[in-house]
Image (tube, rainbow, N blue to C red):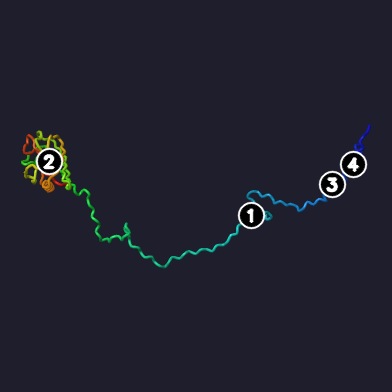
Amino acid sequence: MNTHPFLFMPRAAGRLMAAGALTALLAACASVDLGQRYDPPPVRMPGEQASGSALQPAQPAVSEQPLSQPVQPSSTEGQPLPPLGETGSELPQSGAQPAPITDPNAHILTFSTRLAGGSAVPPSHSQASGQIDAIYDTQSRLLRWKASWHDLSSPITGIAFHGPAQQGQTAPMTMIWPGPFGPRYEGRATLTPQQALDLQQGSWYINVTTQSWPGGEIRGQMHVVR
């Protein structure tokens, strides 16, 4: 039977061979140049300041700016400006009279009259009463009116404007109201210049005649209230 010579090598001889191999390896490493040794910077934890050996980021250069001085106000006093109106002109003096304000309804006259038996001539002593309200346009001479009455003693036989006359006087009819007549009445008419003059002077009256009072049961004088 053949046996490998190293398997039965004495123990002392094996140790000598291992020492020789280690010596040869160290000699080979000594002949290799590793160059300059690399020294990495230490690891910095969050919040820590970098050590003096660590690289610091470059800070931008700060140049000092000269301080600005406050500007002193001018010693020259400003001249007061005159007050201006909306158009840029000077406002009128306080003593000037303002422009008069015109009333757009100045040509409208309003009448309001109460009708009663005591105003009739002669007086009727009736318990009836009434009311007439009218508007007169002095430009167009148009008269418009509304009238009402109640508690008349008998049916109406006629209604008319009379004039010219004052309270307690009588005058012929100047405008007859067409029937029929109920408890209320509305009418309109264009007046002549003379009729308009008499009306504005308070010389017209309204007379309501009935079967019981043919001369007039209730009457009222036309008066301007506006």
**Amino acid type, mark 1:** Pro
Residue that appears at 10% across and 33% down: 155
Viewer-closest of 213 and 2:
2
- Residue bearing mark 3: 25
Residue extending farthest to the top is 1
Q: Which residue is mark 2?
A: 115
Q: Are marks 2 and 3 in contact (CB under 8 Å)?
A: no
Q: Nearer the viewer, residue 135 or 217?
A: 135
Q: Position of residue 114 (x, y in %)?
A: 13, 42
Looking at marks 2 and 4 on the same chain, the residue that comes earlier in the sequence is marked by 4
Q: Are marks 4 and 3 in contact (CB under 8 Å)?
A: no
Give whichever of discs 2 and 3 has the lower sequence position.
3
Q: Name the mark on residue 1.
A: none
Q: CA distance from mark 2 to mark 4?
A: 160 Å
Residue 73: x and y, percent?
44, 65
Mark 2: which secondary structure?
A: strand
Query: What residue did someone put label 1 on?
Result: 57
Relative placement, left or right, of 8 versus 108 is right
At label 4, which amino acid type do we have? Gly
